Image (spheres, rainbow, N blue to C red):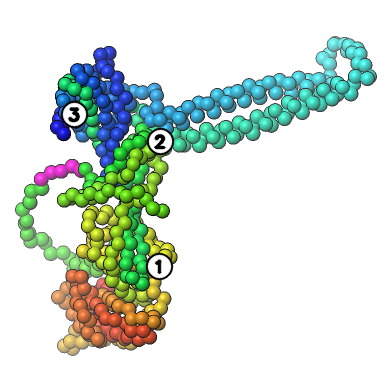
Amino acid sequence: MKKTFIAVAVFCAFSGSAAAQEAARISRVVLYPGSATIERSAKVEQGGGKVVMTGLPANFDARTLRVEAGPGVRVGEVTVLDTGRAEALGGRESQLEAKIEALKDEKSALDVEVKTAEMLRDYLTGMNVRPLPEGEKTQNIYIDGKSIPQVLEAIRKGATDAYGVLQRVELRKRNVDRQIAALERDLGRLRSGARDARTVSIAYSASKPGELRAVYQVANAGWKPAYRAYLDSTTSKVELERVATVQQRTGEDWRGVTLRLATGQPRSAQVVDPNPWQILVQPALPASASVNALLMSEARAPKALGDRRRDENAAPAPIVAQFHTEYATEFEVPGRVDLAADGREVGVSLIKDSVAAKQRIRIVPRSDATAMVTAEGELPEGVWIPGDVQLYRDGSYIGSTFWQAQAKEKMVLPFGRDDRVTVAVKRVKNRTGNSGFVGTRSERQIADLYTITSRHKVAVDLLLLEASPVPVSDQIKVEAVFEPKPKTVNWEDRRGVVAWEQPLKPGETLKFVTDYTITYPKDTPIAGLP
């Protein structure tokens, strides 16, 4: 299919007298994590004329507008006009405004009932005996004694009716006020902000009937990913489900659109050039400033490690088509989709993948003396945007975490504590002293014993991780002794992190000793000492 792309001319005035008015509907939407691409389509007949697309939101980026034409259709002049509008932009917005107006009319009618009842009440009240003005004589009014009960009953009934009407109307008015307030809140959430709209006029000539499409970018719309992970500990399989939450507040409802979700994100692009790398001699800092800088760097290091650790731990549906490109993954939602412009979140289940996983019991006793069940496997193909993942183990909900899927080469997910593995931590050495020639250096020694016991009936794989102290100055020396020796040093290229990886048999107890001796200049403040 031949496509024609043209630039957009923006004019300050527009005359649509000769234009063929065409209510171009939204036919297709591509949602990105922070924006959307809208496609409007309109049928054109053979010959020439103009297609006028009215009621477009004024917040769309006119620079992104492009017009595509089908075979046999040529595009001419394209104009964009910003206009104020008195009518609602979307169908949902129109409905809310109509309901609010109807309720306000109902409230006005209730006010009329109130005034009528108040007049009757005031008249009945005026029938009470009251002092006559000075000089005015009383008049004799004859009332048949037999009619007194009827008169009293009529007065009583009239008063009851008047006060009853007032009470009922007040209750109805409060109810109407609550409905109006709720609808106005919904309307406020629905509106995109500006009360302006845009009109796009497209001139064309066609040798045969065809179609015109206007494509543009809008903000206030997007989708965010979420995941569900189900671990079957018996088969060591993880079912990984992609879930999308979509919403939009563009100001117009999307009715019966084809919806596609894309992991990519349109953004500005520019070529980056290298800058010269210069190395300069800086003036020496005072001693106190150097010590403060060292203390600040040491204080930041544990926080950075903690942040990285948090990041790491961070019904049958129609088939969703999945497309992989060189740079993104896209999902075609089946059928036609309706999405209101009130910002409501709508969940869409996308793709499920079954992943063969290796289960391990991960323990980091210096940080947390609990055993954690983890599942590791190959990450399925595609782009995986960071998002929340709901975790299930053997059908039971474990919890949730923020998952940065592509931060690692493999899929690593935590599936809760293992209460059948106990961890005990004991400090077996804790000494401070002096060393070196005539005691010019201080020395700190600590040793910890980690005791791990399994109450499982089957063997499990153990991963024990230890973050040993790492000196950042030549003046600090660290001697580390491990028993038994760890299998891996600088685990996953993390300096100072050692790992023991081995089976843990049923009922077995394993012991690990970490012994550190840290020496440094005497009377020198050192940050990070245990």
Q: Is residue 236 left or right of residue 123?
A: left
- Where is residue 301? Give x, y as percent: 25, 67
Q: Which residues, given as a range, are shown in magenta?
A: 267-271
Q: In which quarter of the image is residue 194?
A: top left
Please tell me whether residue 489 belongs to the stretch shown in magenta.
no
Residue sitting at 78 percent across and 22 percent down?
124
Specify the amino acid type for callout 3: Ala
Residue sitting at 16 percent across and 51 percent down?
326
Q: Distance between the residues labelled 2 and 1?
A: 42 Å
In terms of secondary structure, where does tag 3 sit? Answer: strand
- Where is residue 290? Give x, y as percent: 19, 67
Quadrant of the image for the C terminus?
bottom left
Depth check: give the residue in front, 138 or 483: 483
Depth check: give the residue in front, 218 or 396: 396
Crowding around mark 2 (Cα neighbors within 10 Å: few <14, some 14 to 19, many 20+) is many
Specify the label residue 190 is tagged with. 2
First reached walking from the N terminus: tag 2 or tag 1: 2
Task: Farthest residue to the front: give it.
Answer: 208
User: Which marked residue is nearer to the observer: mark 2 or mark 1?
Assistant: 1
In terms of secondary structure, where does tag 2 sit? Answer: helix
**Is 240 rendered above or below residue 530?**
above
Task: Farthest residue to the bottom: give it.
Answer: 438
Specify the label residue 394 is tagged with. 1
Specify the label residue 466 is tagged with. none
Specify the amino acid type for callout 2: Leu
**Does residue 220 appear in this view?**
no
Q: How far apart are marks 1 and 3 (CA)?
A: 54 Å
